[in-house]
Every structure is written in structure tokens, then in C-alpha cells.
Image (spheres, grey):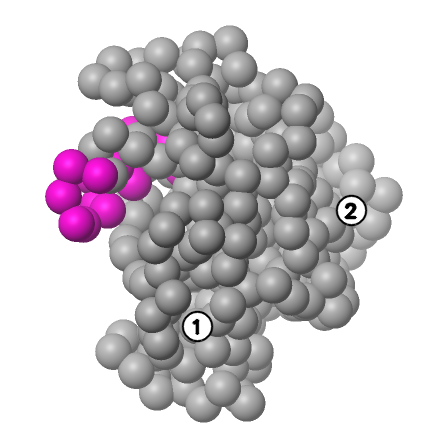
Amino acid sequence: MRWLTFEQGGAQSYGYLTSDGNGVVNVGGRSDLPDLKAAIAAGIVDGSAPYGDVADLELAAVTYLPTIPNPEKILCVGLNYRAHQEETGRGGEAYPTIFVRFAAAQVGHRQPMVRPRESETLDFEGEIAMIIGKSGRRIKRQDAMDHVAGFGIYNDGSVREYQRQTSQFTAGKNFAGTGPFGPWMMTLDEVGDLDEMEITTRLNGEVMQNAKAGLLVFGFAELIEYTSTFLDLVPGDVIVTGTPAGVGAARTPPVFMDEGDVIEVEVKPIGTLSNPVIKG
């Protein structure tokens, strides 16, 4: 199933796509659960269609919001593909590099990604997002996937100038409108072979990044095991698992995004996250 958060007629709601992919079953309009995060916590977000397969809305009529607009935590993993380590000259540690994003920086599918007025160095980072479905602390690797609700697509937009001002990434990773997340979450049962998920990032139609999840330095289960040693993971938490080689800052000359560009991140089999770029 593909679950999404959306706005329609000025009201925020959530639901899932019908089997033909053209309609939305509006779960938020039928349930007392206020949002997708709460629905995940309640255990109704799985491979079934709890309210049937008849659309309440046409997909084309909704405005996409970030898949999880209000996660308690967004944990991002840096330098998690070997080729990206090589192009940046960083990484290689024995443990994952973890930094945080804030929900306020997120935008939905097709919503503008904002190049801030303070810098011309807005870069793209296509990534697979893992959404936690069940709470846990000190989760063992062999049990990790039991705690996953599904996977989505993230563009960890990075203002490189600000990211590199200090040894900490926080400033460059949290400008408003730089974190596209969408268009939906695909439940774990539908994803299939996790290692075969394939990321392709395209800037104005040109392929900039491509890799399969099997090339992650720290895999999905390892990331859950590691992060749950110091945090309680809860439903709706998002782990953004790392970007492949090909980022704009590592190119000669560098390639950064600007007003008028369109950035797309496709993850097979999930779908494609697309955003126009504007100046803020």
C-alpha cells in the first residue's frame, strides 16, 4: 500500500492510494486518528486496505504534504555510500554519521524547494527514507525490520556554504523549504527486496545520481540497531539513510540548484518525488 498525507479543500488529511493508483481513500475523513503518524502507531497502516478500494478523491485533485509532516525525529545518515565518501574525501568511520533535520524544513511532492537568498549553493541529495512503525529501544539487528512501517523518498537539500561553516551540519541542512519528502510511503510488504531499491536523481532531466540500496555502507537494520541504542524510536520517526555519489558540490565545476530548475528523485519501486526550485 502507498500511504500519503495531503491537503484537499483547505483541510489536511491522510489516506492511501487505490489499487489503480489514480484515487485516494481518505482515511483521515473516516477515522478519529488525527494524522498518518497516529495511524501508524495504531497499527492500521499495513499492506491491507482497511477502508476498501473505492476512491473518495482523485489523486490529481490533492495537494501533497510531507509524508510524515510531524515526525518526532528525523535522523539523517551522512556519507553512507562508499562512492560518496570517495568523492567528498570524508567518512569511513566504524559507525554511522548521524545528524538531524527538523520537520519545519520539509515540503511535499510538487511543492517548491527553496534556494535561500543567503547562498547560491543549494545542492541535491536523493535518499531512501525509512519510516518507523513500532516503538523500540536497543533493538537487535535481527529484529529491526519488525519496527519498520515502510519506505519513502527524501531529498536532503543542502546549502553547502552553511553546512561547511563549522564541523556540524545542522545549519546547512535546515533552511526552510529544503527537505522534500514524498510523494508517499510504500509499506514494507510491497517494497520487496530492500537491496534492490534503486535511487536515481535527475536535475532538469539529467541523471546526477544512481545507486541501489545494497551499496549502503550501513544497511537499514544496522541503522535501526545503532540509533536505537541512544534513542527510543517511535512510530512516525524518519531515518533518511544516505545519498549516493554524484552530488553537485563534488562535480567540476560544481552544480547547484537555482530558480527554474526541477529536481526529481526516483526510488524504484516506490515512485518519484519531484519539486520545482524557487528563490526564497
> Residue under circle 1?
223
Characterize the magenta stretch by its predominant secondary structure: loop
Instruction: Farthest residue to the left: give it.
Output: 166
Name the amino acid, label 2: Thr
Image quadrant in which you'd find residue 114: top left
Residue ID at (77%, 56%): 52
Classify 10 Å Cα crowding around label 1: few (below 14), some (14-19), many (20 and above).
Answer: many
Relative depth, front residue between 63 and 147: 147
Relative depth, front residue between 30 and 173: 173
Checking the image for residue 27, the label placed there is: none
Residue ID at (65%, 51%): 211
Image coords of residue 150 (percent x, y)? 59, 63
Q: Which residues are magenta?
A: 164-183
Closer to the chain start, of discs 1 and 2, is 2
Q: Is residue 200 left or right of residue 108?
A: right
> Residue under circle 2?
18
Q: Is residue 50 left or right of residue 218?
A: right
Q: Is residue 120 left or right of residue 19?
A: left
Residue ID at (25%, 78%): 230
Q: Secondary structure at mark 2?
A: loop
Q: Is residue 174 above or below residue 113?
A: below
Image quadrant in which you'd find residue 161: top left
Image coords of residue 23 (percent x, y)? 75, 37
**Looking at the image, can residue 50 be seen?**
no
Asked if residue 172 is among those painted magenta in the image, a careful observer would answer yes
Image quadrant in which you'd find residue 20: top right
Q: Is residue 236 above or below residue 161?
A: below
The quarter of the rendered structure image containing the C terminus is top left
Image coords of residue 255 (percent x, y)? 46, 23
